[in-house]
Structure formats: structure tokens, C-alpha cells
Image (cartoon, grey):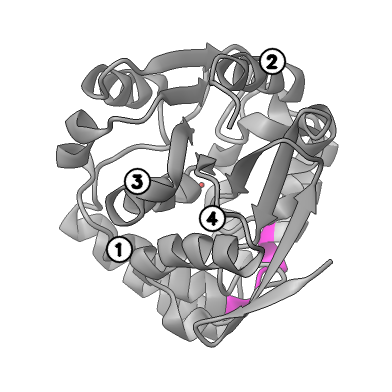
């Protein structure tokens, strides 16, 4: 699968299927693997563009990581692959932070937004400080410390042990520089709350019933602030919705996508 050289980073991406373009952006510090089932379910009807975020998984260029750069990377990747149509942008958690930044910076490239297990608020000063401290520790001790912190809250109570083992491995194996850079990018991200009432693209908000990181209440509040948005709360899932309840996630996403006009 190919890489694109963008802003001094080699960005890994996959393209599956054909149809109107849908970009799938994973969360922190995950990989394109998050979308494996989504790709299988949707590639018959949509062209799925699946990047790995700068510095994470198979992508390099951590030294340039900011939320703005993550958003610009998507716009630059679309140019690189010659995709000129406006896209549906599906962002999970940190991918949702990126999607909101993309709305602010590249509105003309956006057909619709899907915000999965995410929220619009910036870090509190205390949370930002914690992330900076963790970033320094990751550089010394490796990404395993992030897995230790995240694993207890990442999945809902019904997740299979094999799924937990798999994702602990993926998170622990994330490049330390990229994980540290992403922590700093999240600490420095803008407040997207004032953006929500300005969102004039069709928007779906999706959240797992048991999401302990970005809770259903946070999703309800975000949904209430976005004009005309749709909300789907998926039973039986924690924060890792696309892998915890793939069938229900794919059905809700397909239903939203199916309601958009073809481009
Ligand atoms: C994510 O899943 O991308 C992160 O948990 C988001 C965050 O730490 O704010």
C-alpha cells in the first residue's frame, strides 16, 4: 500500500472500493486497522480513503504534528491522489478533533462530517499539562505506558479479551515520537465548541453507549449544538465503536451515508 510525501512526512494510506469519497480517520494512538470491518462493509458502495495519522502506525513526520497539520495532511492527501470531489470525513476521537479542524480550514473540501466517539472541548490546563508530562515519559519509556493508561477505559464491558490484547499490542507498538507528538498536538488543540453552530455540512454524531472517554452525554451536547445533526448511540460499545460493535456501527453509518446525495 502506498505512502505520500507530505510536509516532510511519509504518510501511509489505503484506498478501497469506488463511489463517492469517504475518508476514515482513526483515533489516538491507533491505526488503519480500526476500520478493517468498516472497509469490508462499505467498499462496495463508497470509495474509502484511509490514512494513518502523521507519526503514528506506518506514517512518519511526527516532528511536524499539530492538529492543523493533521487536517492539512488530509487535504494534501486528497490532492496527491487526485481526488477533487468534496469528501465525507469520518473522524474517531482524535480523528474527530482533526475533522473539526478540517471543517475550519478546508470547508470547500467537505461533503459531510461523521464525528465518532469524540467531543469539541479543548483540554483543561491540567489535562494539557498531564499530556505534556506523558509525552516526555513516552519518549523515555515507550508507548506501552499509554496502553497502560488507556486500556482500562478504552473498551466497554462486553469487549472480547482477544480484542483488548490486539489493541494493547497496537498501542504499545506505536512509534514513541509520534505518540508524544500527538499528545502535544491534542494539548494545544483549539476549542471547537464555538465552531459547532457554524457547521453547515450534514453531520452525524456516533457514540458507544458505554464510552467512558467521550461519553454519550458529551455526544448529546455536541449533537444539540450542530444544526440538523443526527445522533446515533450504539448499545453495547465503549470508545472503540468501529471494532466493538462493527455491525451496528456500519449500519448507522451506512444509513447516514445513504441519505446523502451522490457526488
Ligand atoms: C482518542 O481516542 O483519540 C483519544 O482518547 C482522545 C483523547 O485522548 O482526547
Mark 3 and mark 4 lie on one chain; the one further toward the N terminus is 4
Up/down of 157 relative to 124, above or below: above
Residue 152 percent coordinates (x, y): 58, 41
Mark 3 and mark 2 lie on one chain; the one further toward the N terminus is 3
Q: Which residue position is annotated with label 3? A: 100
Question: Contact, CB < 8 Å: mark 2 with mark 4?
Answer: no
Residue 93 percent coordinates (x, y): 47, 43
Mark closer to the observer (1, 3) = 3
Q: Quadrant of the C terminus?
A: top right
Secondary element under disc 2, as helix, strand or loop, is helix
Secondary element under disc 1, as helix, strand or loop, is helix
Q: Which residue position is annotated with label 2? A: 251
Up/down of 63 relative to 202, above or below: below
Alpha carbon of mark 4 to alpha carbon of mark 1: how far?
Answer: 13 Å
Mark 1 and mark 3 lie on one chain; the one further toward the N terminus is 3
Q: Which residue position is annotated with label 4? A: 28
Secondary element under disc 4, as helix, strand or loop, is loop
Alpha carbon of mark 3 to alpha carbon of mark 2: how far?
Answer: 23 Å
Give the magenta-colored segment's residue range: 171-176
Question: Contact, CB < 8 Å: mark 3 with mark 2?
Answer: no
Question: Contact, CB < 8 Å: mark 4 with mark 1?
Answer: no
Residue 158 percent coordinates (x, y): 70, 21
Mark 2 and mark 1 lie on one chain; the one further toward the N terminus is 1
Q: Nearer the viewer, residue 186 or 198?
A: 198
Q: Which residue position is annotated with label 1? A: 187
Mark closer to the observer (2, 4) = 2
Residue at mark 4: C-beta within 8 A of ligand 1: yes
Alpha carbon of mark 2 to alpha carbon of mark 4: how far?
Answer: 24 Å
Amino acid at each position: 500500500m502506498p505512502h505520500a510525501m507530505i510536509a516532510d512526512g511519509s504518510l501511509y494510506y489505503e484506498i478501497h472500493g469506488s463511489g463517492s469519497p469517504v475518508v476514515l480517520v482513526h483515533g489516538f494512538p491507533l491505526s488503519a486497522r480500526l476500520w478493517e470491518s468498516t472497509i469490508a462493509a462499505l467498499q462496495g458502495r463508497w470509495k474509502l480513503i484511509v490514512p494513518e495519522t502523521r507519526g503514528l502506525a506506518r506514517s512518519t513526520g511526527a516532528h511536524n504534528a499539530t492538529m492543523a497539520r493533521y487536517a492539512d495532511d488530509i487535504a494534501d492527501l486528497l490532492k496527491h491522489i487526485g481526488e477533487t470531489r468534496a469528501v465525507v470525513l469520518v473522524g474517531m476521537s482524535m480523528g474527530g478533533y482533526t475533522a473539526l479542524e478540517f471543517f475550519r480550514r478546508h470547508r470547500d473540501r467537505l461533503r459531510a462530517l461523521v464525528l465518532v466517539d469524540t467531543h469539541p472541548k479543548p483540554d483543561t490546563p491540567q489535562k494539557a499539562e498531564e499530556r505534556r508530562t506523558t509525552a516526555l515519559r513516552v519518549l523515555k519509556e515507550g508507548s506501552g505506558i499509554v496502553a497502560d493508561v488507556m486500556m482500562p477505559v478504552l473498551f466497554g464491558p462486553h469487549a472480547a479479551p482477544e480484542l483488548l490484547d490486539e489493541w494493547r499490542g497496537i498501542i504499545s507498538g506505536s512509534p514513541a515520537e509520534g505518540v508524544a507528538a500527538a499528545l502535544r498536538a491534542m494539548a494545544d488543540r483549539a476549542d471547537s465548541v464555538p465552531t459547532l453552530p457554524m457547521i453547515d455540512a450534514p453531520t452525524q454524531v456516533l457514540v458507544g453507549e458505554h464510552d467512558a472517554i467521550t461519553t454519550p452525554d458529551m455526544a448529546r451536547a455536541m449533537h444539540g449544538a450542530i444544526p440538523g445533526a443526527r445522533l446515533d448511540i450504539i448499545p453495547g460499545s465503549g470508545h472503540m465503536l468501529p471494532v466493538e460493535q462493527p455491525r451496528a456501527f456500519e449500519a448507522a453509518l451506512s444509513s447516514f451515508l445513504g441519505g446523502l446525495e451522490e457526488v
